[in-house]
Image: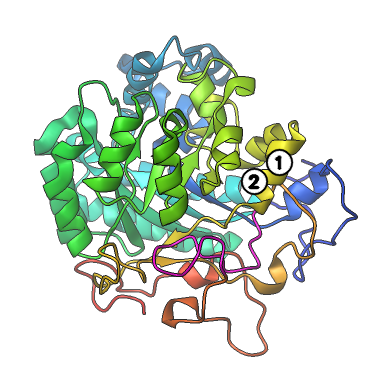
Amino acid sequence: MGARDGELESLPESGPPVAEHSDTVSDGELLRWPKVDLHLHLVGSAAPDTVAELAGRHPGAGVPTDPAALRAFYAFRDFPHFIEVYTAVSGLVRAAADIEALVVGLGGDLLAQGVFYAEVTVTPVTHLRAGIRADELARALESGAARVRRDTGVELAWVYDISAGDGLSGARETLRVALDQPPVGLVGFGLGGSEAGVDRADYRDVFGQARAAGLRSVPHAGETAGPDQVWAAVRDLRADRVGHGIAAQRDPRLMGHLRDHGITLEVCPSSNVATGAVPELAAHPLKDLLAHGVPVTLGSDDPPMFATSLLEEYRRDRADPRSAQDVGENRHPVQLRPGPRPAPTDGRGTDALTPPRLGAASPTGGRSSPGWRVGACRASHRGAGPAGATCPPTRSHRGPRPGTTPRCGSSARVRDGAGPGRGKPTE
């Protein structure tokens, strides 16, 4: 990229220049455009050198201690094999200091890609079982995020998720930790892991309690299972966004529902290919989802494990001009914010989601691009009017103070003390 680790090459404060219309977007443009990553796992973001160092401390874990050997270790036979490898790597994280180190490393990686806001998924029960207390986990996340904010300007928020392999008992423990000892910046409640034999509807009550406490519903669904699980995520878990959700492509009625209700799919193409969910990038459902008007945000998922990054996802998407233009014209993905349960207007709630206001730090002009139209607040949340309509100003769409230049993710920042059990939420 032409930048040292943790640095972004010449990002202009006033936003990138607007090039003439072209189906080809340069690496420089992709790098300079502000980006958000809304589907990113903390453990899965660990750099190979970090994983190798942790493996050296715990040689019995079965994880290679040579960074070069991790490439072969990350060659997944199928999705169950991926879960096996991910579990082994997760088991290396055994101290709060490890958590903070992962957060700080992630911040530098994001800055180098021009990513200024990310919602990072953490699986608390895994860390509790490794000996990290819930309060230690929260403090490590907060401390790491504060260092990242101070050193890079990158803003991080958190999603606590249930590992499906832990069952309903693990779900209840995840909920307890999320509500009783959350980190500052906890915005979402998720469900990940294997979908085999796991019905999303079984988690209805747990998600209902999380939503009642102000957390937003962001479960994985339809990654390796069928569209029925995406329906369950939407109907039973009241999903605000759906992780992956690519099985929706097989159900036109479901795609129409996602489009009409502004439910964004967090699509991670390289992840789907690496785990065998999709045979190759050329066969990925992304183009069909976009063609049907489904709101989509690109995510990197577990980037080093899949030999990718968010910037690389845009580069790979750029190889298909039709897909690249469609992503550029798609509504901006919503960011989450903690807060009291919103008063419903359509049974789903309308003020639950906060699109960013990025102003001059965004691509502008009438051209299509593989970056989102991040300068415009587009109605991708429920009740805000017809699909694609511009959002009216509300409390949750406050702009920057006069005389200041907004930065990516600035509207999603959480004041100290916000979140469930941590004082007054951001308004």
Where disc 2 sits, the SS reads helix
Task: Determine which of the numbered discs, if any, sits on residue 327 in the image.
Answer: 2
Residue type marked 2: Val
Residue 378 inside the magenta-drawn segment: yes
| 60, above or below 332, in the image | above
Residue that sits furthest to the right in the current view:
20
| Magenta stretch bounds | 371-389
Residues 368 and 192: in front is 368
Q: Residue, x 50% and y 72% (percent of image)?
A: 411
Task: Determine which of the numbered discs, if any, sits on residue 301 in the image.
Answer: none
Residues 297 and 131: in front is 297
Q: What residue is shown with label 1? A: 324
Residue 305 location in percent, x, y? 50, 26
Measured Cα–Cα span from mark 2 to mark 1:
5 Å
Residue 154 location in percent, x, y? 56, 59
Residue 224 inside the magenta-drawn segment: no
Residue that sits furthest to the left in the current view:
169
Residue that sits furthest to the front in the current view:
253
Magenta part mainly helix, strand or loop?
loop
